[in-house]
Image (cartoon, rainbow, N blue to C red):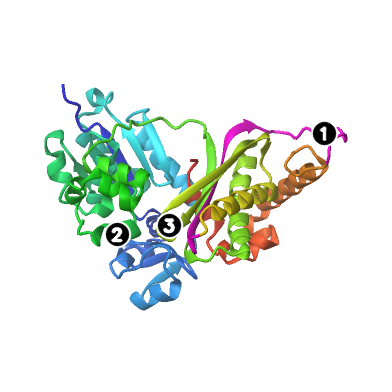
């Protein structure tokens, strides 16, 4: 028997802006943006004027003079998101939460209780709207990729069910930008070669795609366009790694830029590790060059790391290795740090003073001093907020302009 559209993708519509409109009814139906100097998120009313996330505040105001900027209620984002996930969990235990505002769910074992996948999607949408007050779009399909695309087609506030018999009929006329992994830059590169639809992408030779997109990305998007996706919904388990990334347009990799960006990323990653009383032995960095080519470098140490300065130094060393191996690449557009091979670290075991003092060892004099400073910073931030204290190189850099609360909500454990 052919499997049905039992995988659902639920995606809250314009989540951050919708929450602000829920909290303040006077904002409903009006163009709003969460942020100030820059747009962190925009309502659909603002998007109609071309306003979008990551846009500067002055540009957004140019496009939409009536735009209303509001500050973010970060604790409310998390609370309301958890309520939505609670509703979803009433229909199936097979839920894979992939960010604060979206999740996959497998309802193959629930249809005998709640009806067809379409009926389940409609019931979830109704309950989220009535009980929580937020709009959510849902796509249902046989695979995760199709379900996610269906939820994007369903927006705003809709439901699309893709039956197995019409998968290619649904998929192939759609724009390539809907394929998972294709961003604006890649979409433009495909357009330059006359590839605009998913069907055109599917009919492109795989070796050609791998040649100008890179082997990993070309192979991935080619398979998805051909409707090949064997991934299943996996229940969220304890994270095997923690990561963060920063995209900043084309810039020369000066030492000042590297230290500022990596310091900010390390502050976020190490802080999240310490909040869970964890540390990791493997540090991985990713560098994306201007042409969308990405390289990674990693190192595994005997002792786990969870301190900000040590993680910054390790990441800086790895990024320098990546840059030195690609001297022809003049500019970079993204840096990322992740820490894996995690272990529990509720307390710190100090070393006997018989080894040389090295910061990479947590129990050394320097390592333990960094551990103590970071935990003091964490305590102050818990009481007074993240901006109350921090390392100067991070707090005073331009890469701290987006509130960390927003970054952390938007990111998920990798």
Helix, strand or loop under label 2: helix
Magenta residues, as a range? 328-356
Q: Is residue 363 left or right of residue 30?
A: right
Asked whether residue 185 appears in the rendered view, the answer is yes
Residue placed under numbered mark 1 in the picture? 351
- Circle 3: element type: helix
**Mark 1 surroundings within 10 Å by alpha-carbon count, few (fewer than 14), some (14 through 19), many (20 or more):** some
Gap in angstroms between the C-alphas marked 1 and 2 = 54 Å
Reading the image, the residue beneath label 2 is 189
Up the image or down, 24 lies above or below 103; here it is: below
What separation in Å lies between label 3 and label 2 (alpha carbons)? 41 Å
For marks 1 and 2 on the same chain, the one whose residue lies earlier in the sequence: 2
- Label 1 vs label 3, nearer the camera: 1
In terms of depth relative to the viewer, which is nearer, 412 or 76?
412
Q: What is the x, y in percent for residue 343? A: 63, 31
Q: Nearer the viewer, residue 11 or 303?
A: 303
Residue at 33% x, 67% y is 46
Disc marking residue 23: 3
Question: Could you tell me which secondary element the residue under label 1 belongs to?
Answer: loop
Name which residue lies at 54% across and 45% down.
Answer: 297
Query: Marks 1 and 2: which is nearer the front?
Result: 2
Residue 349 magenta: yes
For the image shown, how many numbered marks are present on the structure? 3
């Amino acid at each position: 028997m052919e499997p049905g559209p039992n995988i659902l993708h639920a995606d809250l519509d314009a989540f951050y802006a919708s929450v602000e409109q829920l909290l303040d009814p006077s904002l409903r139906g009006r163009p709003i943006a969460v942020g100030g100097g820059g747009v962190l998120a925009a309502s659909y009313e603002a998007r109609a004027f071309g306003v979008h996330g990551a846009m500067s505040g002055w540009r957004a105001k140019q496009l939409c003079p009536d735009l209303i900027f509001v500050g973010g209620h970060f604790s409310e984002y998390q609370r309301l998101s958890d309520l939505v996930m609670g509703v979803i969990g009433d229909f199936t235990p097979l839920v894979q939460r992939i960010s604060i505002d979206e999740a996959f769910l497998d309802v193959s074992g629930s249809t005998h209780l709640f009806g067809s996948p379409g009926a389940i999607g409609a019931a979830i949408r109704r309950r989220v709207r009535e009980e929580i007050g937020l709009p959510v779009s849902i796509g249902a399909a046989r695979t995760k990729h199709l379900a996610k695309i269906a939820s994007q087609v369903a927006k705003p506030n809709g439901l699309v069910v893709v039956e197995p018999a019409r998968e290619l009929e649904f998929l192939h006329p759609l724009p390539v930008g809907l394929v998972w992994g294709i961003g604006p830059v890649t979409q433009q590169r495909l357009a330059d070669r006359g590839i605009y639809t998913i069907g055109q992408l599917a009919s492109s030779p795989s070796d050609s795609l791998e040649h100008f997109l890179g082997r990993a990305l070309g192979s991935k998007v080619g398979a998805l366009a051909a409707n090949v996706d064997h991934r299943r919904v996996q229940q969220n388990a304890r994270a095997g790694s923690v990561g963060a990334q920063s995209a900043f347009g084309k810039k020369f990799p000066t030492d000042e830029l590297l230290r500022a960006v990596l310091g900010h990323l390390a502050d976020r990653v190490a802080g999240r590790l310490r909040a869970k009383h964890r540390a990791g032995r493997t540090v991985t960095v990713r560098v994306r060059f201007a042409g969308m080519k990405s390289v990674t470098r990693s190192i595994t140490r005997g002792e786990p790391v969870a301190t900000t300065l040590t993680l910054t130094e390790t990441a800086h060393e790895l990024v320098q290795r990546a840059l030195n191996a690609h001297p022809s690449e003049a500019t970079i557009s993204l840096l990322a740090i992740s820490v894996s091979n995690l272990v529990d670290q509720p307390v710190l075991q100090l070393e006997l003073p018989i080894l040389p003092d090295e910061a990479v060892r947590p129990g050394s004099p320097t390592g333990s001093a960094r551990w103590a400073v970071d935990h003091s910073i964490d305590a102050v931030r818990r009481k007074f907020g993240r901006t109350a204290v921090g390392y100067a190189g991070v707090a005073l850099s331009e890469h701290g302009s987006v509130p960390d609360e927003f970054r952390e909500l938007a990111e998920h454990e990798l």
